[in-house]
Image (spheres, coloured by chain):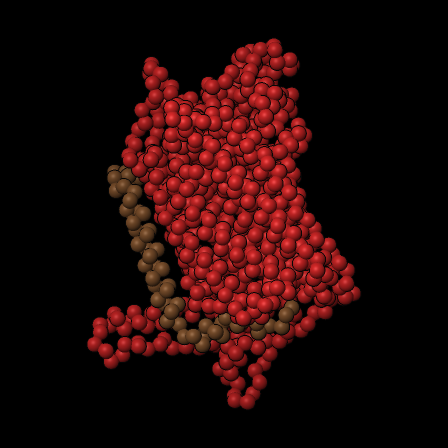
Chain colours: A red, B brown
Amino acid sequence: MAADALEDAKKSGDGPGTSPKLDQFVYNDKIVRAFLLVTLLWGVVALLVGILIALQLVLPKLNLGLLMTAFGRLRPLHTNAAIFAFAGNAIFAAVYHSTQRLCKTRIFSDALSWFHFWGWQLIIVAAAVSLPLGYTTGKEYAELEWPIDIAIAVVWVAFTINFFGTLFIRRERHMYVTLWFYIATIVTIPILHIFNSLELPAGFMKSYPVYAGVQDAFVQWWYGHNAVGFMLTTPFLGIMYYYLPKAAERPVYSYRLSIIHFWSLVFIYIWAGPHHLHYTALPEWASTLGMLFSVMLWMPSWGGMINGLLTLRGAWSKVASEPILKFLVVAVTFYGMSTFEGPLLSVKSVNALSHYTDWTIAHVHAGALGWNGFLTFGMVYWLMPRMFQTKLWSKTLANAHFWIATVGILLYIVPIYVAGLTQGLMWRAIDSSGELVHGDFVETVMRLMPMYWLRVLGGLLYLAGAVLCGVNCFKTWTTRPATYEEPVQEAAPLPRDYAEPPKPESRLKGMPVADAAHRFDVWLQGWWHRRWERLPFRFAVWVTIAVVVASLFEFIPLFLIRSNVPTIASVQPYTPLELAGRDIYLSEGCYNCHSQMVRPILSEVKRYPPEYSKPGEFVYDHPFQWGSRRIGPDLHREGGLKAPLWHFEHFENPSRVVQNSIMPSYKPLLTTDLDFAAIPGRMAAMKTLGVPYTREEIEGAYDPDPQVDGTAEIQAKERAEKIGKQAGYPELERKRVIALIAYLERLGVDLFRPPPGEGTGQMADVDGVGDEGDGAE
Amino acid sequence: MGLGGLMSNLGMNIFAMIGLVVFFAMFVAIIAWAWSRPRRELEYQARLPLEEDDG
């Protein structure tokens, strides 16, 4: 029984020598077992999809010529499965297990627990079905469409009530540091989710974000980086702080350090998002701020790593014999590596090389496979025998899992680091005459193939390890007792009339200092934070304030200041057909391979002439499609470069048009009809979001009378005629590929058009540009 | 002049500076407070997960 609770019980009126009254209760471990099992299931699924998409890059035929199985639709399935299905369920298993024990109480509501469990699994299934079907918002790690977004919010509310309810009925007054990290996760995730998912429905599974262009990019990566921070870092630090001491049978090295790094992490993480947008059209001040705070983030991150590793002082001998400790130690080590590498990648000059390359992918996977994966497996091996009330079936198998998976991680990340550096250096290489050394983009892709094959091998080894874990888990489960015991726990309730300890006295008493100095010294003794640690709601409020204040410092200027997004008079909204084509670009997940952002870097402007991308070119882009990868070339200046027939043949069979291309075939786009009737509705939604379509343009886009062509149909016929009868596909003007070609032909051309009503073809003047406004170096 | 115009005229550097100052002040305050806590109390809090029997 906690000394604190005993002390409280004594204070509640029981006299000396009287035993305090004890409550009896039973932990709900059924919910923990459920989350544990689905963690393993979804982990294997996420890894399988990961291996499939890795194979698709080396064997493009594995895209199977179907839209549902193409890389662009499957990659989001992999990322969502890894983050929300595998890591998400692992987090919930840990939260339900450790929170009950740290609070010495059963979970607040069994009903809410099961609602949370089944709700989350249904969300995962909805994602698994909708993403391959092409229902996507086109925003990374936030691809799920609005009905699923609402479901996520509802399930998260249930989880929040359940968690805070448990804190309110706890029998341990002090909230251990693990609970702080859980609180940070639980309050921050909905803020990120809700604000990034503000979207206007334009159909049952179709929506457009309220933000556009530069602001959308900023919000997306405020969300994206903090999804990493508050879904993949803070809850896992909470897991580390509970399960590492338990496994090592040692208390955490420095509780003081855990306080410092918790608050630093929570405050600094939020600012770091813009480091995903260096040298893009994001205003330079935002990019610099993101870099600065990302570098500062190194400190609290390493605070966590140091605390974790030094917790093992005096217990290092156990690591050699215990697979659980091996997983946990290597996890914390990868955390340290990734949180050093992250700030390094945030430095603009490093980022100029690494952005869009596989270096980012290697960084992500070192963290995901090493930190998140290994911490999860360590926790699973620790929990399994306890939750199934039996011994672990095979320690040898667990050790084998560890070594195979470790080799797997190294075989993944080392080749992909090499691939990333190769890409970055090849893209920027310029010869003595000032021309690109590797002007052919596909040449740079081909150079990576050996590394991509090694990555597949690394992934297969990691999957093999996960399968061993699954076998071990299953065999352990088979030796479970016929009925699980439900040991009755005893703990004294917290007295309702708890008397707060008095404020401490000033240590400067008797010294000739001002009153303010006395008050500051009293404040320094931290009586107020000790109160917070006993008051979960107030603690949560302060975490929320830290997160919101940090966010507002970036949001407010970006949204209020006109000069941040200088308008360009010649940039006009997409035509109806182009808008339909853009929706196809989104649903096929083209952003997973192609970027649309020419950075103001010499080699980049040479490769994608004639100008780098300006912020004002994206004002009508709901959502933005700047991308974060270049498995294929950047497309922002694609408009006008190639004839429609070239695009047509390229979508039909990319490798026939571009030798060695690894792009999948999009032949189904040549044979499936475009939904012309949906176009006015999409334009109306855009108009609501501020795109200046007129009512006539919207109504004229499509005419239900089959004898009358709307604007979109007229535009489609014009394009189909340009492609000509060589194509050999009947009724080409009604097919989806025509719209997609129209969109590609529009990319990047507006900058060089005269504004409406003017004559010349010179590059348009950009309004209201300040030195900090246009993102240029 | 609206709020947007006013903020446009102020320029961006001020936000970066304010943010950095706020963060740094917070960081110093947190360190000062954490270092002033009694050791015994922290040791008790650190041992909380180990009080429970495994399970």
Whether residue A503 sits left or right of residue A223 in the image: it is left
| Residue, far right | A482
Please identify the quarter of the rendering in which residue A135 is found.
Answer: top right
Q: Is residue A631 above or below residue A741?
A: below
Q: Residue at x 56, y 67 (%)?
A: A316
Q: Is residue A114 above or below residue A560?
A: below
Whether residue A612 sits left or right of residue A74 in the image: it is left
| Residue, far left | A512
Residue A25 in percent (x, y) is at 64, 72
Name the one closer to the observer, B50 or A505. Answer: B50
Q: Residue at x 61, y 52 (%)?
A: A406
Please identify the quarter of the rendering in which residue A517 is found.
Answer: bottom left
Name the one closer to the observer, A690 or A42. Answer: A42
Q: Residue at x 60, y 58 (%)?
A: A327
Name the one closer to the observer, A694 or A555. Answer: A555
Q: Is residue A734 above or below residue A491?
A: above
Whether residue A107 sits left or right of residue A688 in the image: it is right
